[in-house]
């Protein structure tokens, strides 16, 4: 077992250092050791099962491949997409897509018993299934997908996951299905953002994978304000902070103890150009104030900016809802927000910039504070390294 843990740790470490997309998703979903699967498998709820004895026999690079294989089953929601299709054949089709994708990306070492199908990385599992239906002897397949409602699937002939299906194949009710889908979408969206921000392995193969995921997984995106909320709640601290001295002590730097968790400083930059209507500003403010009340920032700076910063306001979270009224209405250069933050609030927890998107952007690594851009236009040219969500009216 110690050798298994060691190999898993080495594989995870390599992914953390080299593959931000895969490591981001891998660390969001639980893993469980079990001898009921031949190699590894995923459940409808995203649990990754692995066989410790098999892990010990594999090389570290093969374990990397295996973990990324299961990650892509989660990312593509294969456990939830089978419908009425044959268990084994849909597994073949799903494995073909994943294996060719990982081989093209040169991630880990392909495990010889896996499925190969030239060109599958550019297709969907459903498309491949239609092609291979009734043409491949399913009994020879080594499956790794457990579908919803599979607890009776052990009756299938030569099923290598029979025992695992009885244990982990519980049905996913419609009410829970939506939550699982949203959890996967959020994990994929964050992984894509992390990959783009780190600018790691952004060649044509990774770009193609991200495009596929954006088209087939993120078609129904989470609302912008949910993404805003998840961005900000990451910075909520637990009960004490070293950000500022306790005022009772003038010569000793001690943490301030809070009765409840809250975030530190928040900077809000707002584009005051004419394309941001009062209706848009009101809709943005409505959801922003909800998130502020949840996160309770220690201090809030609101910067109103067109071609330069026209006004700076300072608020406490208890002030919400405060009035949002745009001065200026001139040209647009939101880099002024970034410059101000770097010079005056470099220790802030987060910055949120609301803009139409038609503005110069800071260069990569110029943002010293984690920043989320909320952009109203879908046609604006936005650099890949900019962390953004697209604003839509309710």
Image: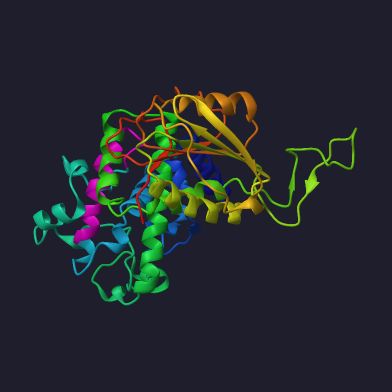
Quick check: can you spot residue 28? Answer: no
**Residue 387 percent coordinates (x, y):** 43, 36
Q: Nearer the viewer, residue 247 or 278?
A: 278
The span shown in magenta is 89-110
Q: Quadrant of the C terminus?
A: bottom left
Percent x, y of residue 336: 50, 25
Q: Position of residue 159 (x, y in %)?
A: 28, 67
Instruction: Depth check: give the residue in front, 362 or 132.
Output: 362
In the depicted structure, whether residue 230 falls above or below residue 300: below
90 horizontally vs 366: left or right: left
Q: Is residue 372 above or below residue 344?
A: below
Say if 18 sits above or below 79 in the image.
above
Q: Residue at x 22, y 67 (%)?
A: 83
Count of picture labels: 0
Asked whether residue 291 is in view, the answer is yes
The answer to if 96 sits in the magenta stretch is yes
């Amino acid at each position: 077992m110690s050798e298994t843990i060691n190999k898993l740790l080495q594989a995870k470490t390599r992914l953390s250092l080299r593959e931000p997309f895969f490591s981001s998703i891998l660390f969001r979903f639980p893993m469980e050791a079990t001898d009921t699967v031949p190699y590894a498998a995923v459940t409808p709820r995203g649990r990754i099962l692995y066989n410790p004895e098999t892990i010990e026999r594999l090389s570290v690079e093969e374990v990397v491949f295996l973990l990324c294989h299961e990650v892509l089953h989660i990312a593509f929601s294969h456990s939830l997409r089978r419908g009425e299709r044959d268990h084994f054949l849909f597994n073949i089709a799903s494995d073909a897509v994943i294996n060719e994708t990982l081989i093209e990306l040169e991630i880990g070492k392909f495990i010889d018993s896996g499925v190969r199908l030239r060109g599958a990385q550019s297709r969907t599992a459903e498309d491949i299934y239609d092609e291979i239906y009734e043409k491949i002897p399913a009994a020879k397949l080594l499956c790794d997908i457990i579908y919803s409602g599979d607890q009776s699937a052990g009756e299938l002939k030569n099923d290598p996951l029979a025992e695992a299906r009885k244990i982990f194949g519980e049905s996913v009710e419609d009410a829970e299905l939506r939550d699982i889908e949203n959890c996967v979408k959020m994990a994929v969206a964050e992984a894509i953002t992390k990959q783009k921000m780190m600018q790691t392995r952004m060649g044509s193969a990774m770009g193609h994978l991200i495009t596929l995921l954006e088209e087939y997984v993120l078609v129904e995106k989470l609302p912008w304000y949910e993404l805003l909320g998840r961005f900000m709640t990451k910075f909520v601290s637990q009960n004490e902070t070293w950000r500022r001295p306790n005022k009772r002590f003038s010569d000793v730097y001690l943490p301030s103890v809070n009765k409840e968790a809250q975030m530190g400083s928040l900077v809000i930059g707002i584009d005051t150009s004419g394309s941001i209507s009062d209706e848009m500003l009101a809709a943005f403010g409505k959801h922003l104030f909800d998130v502020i009340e949840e996160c309770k920032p220690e201090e809030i700076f609101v910067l109103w900016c067109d071609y330069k910063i026209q006004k700076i306001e300072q608020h406490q979270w208890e002030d919400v809802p405060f009035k949002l009224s745009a001065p200026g209405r001139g040209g647009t250069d939101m880099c002024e927000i970034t410059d101000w933050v770097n010079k005056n609030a470099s220790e802030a927890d987060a910055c949120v910039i609301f803009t139409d998107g038609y503005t110069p952007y800071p260069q990569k690594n110029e943002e010293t504070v984690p920043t989320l851009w909320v952009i109203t236009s879908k046609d604006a040219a936005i650099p890949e390294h900019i962390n953004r969500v697209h604003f839509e009216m309710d």
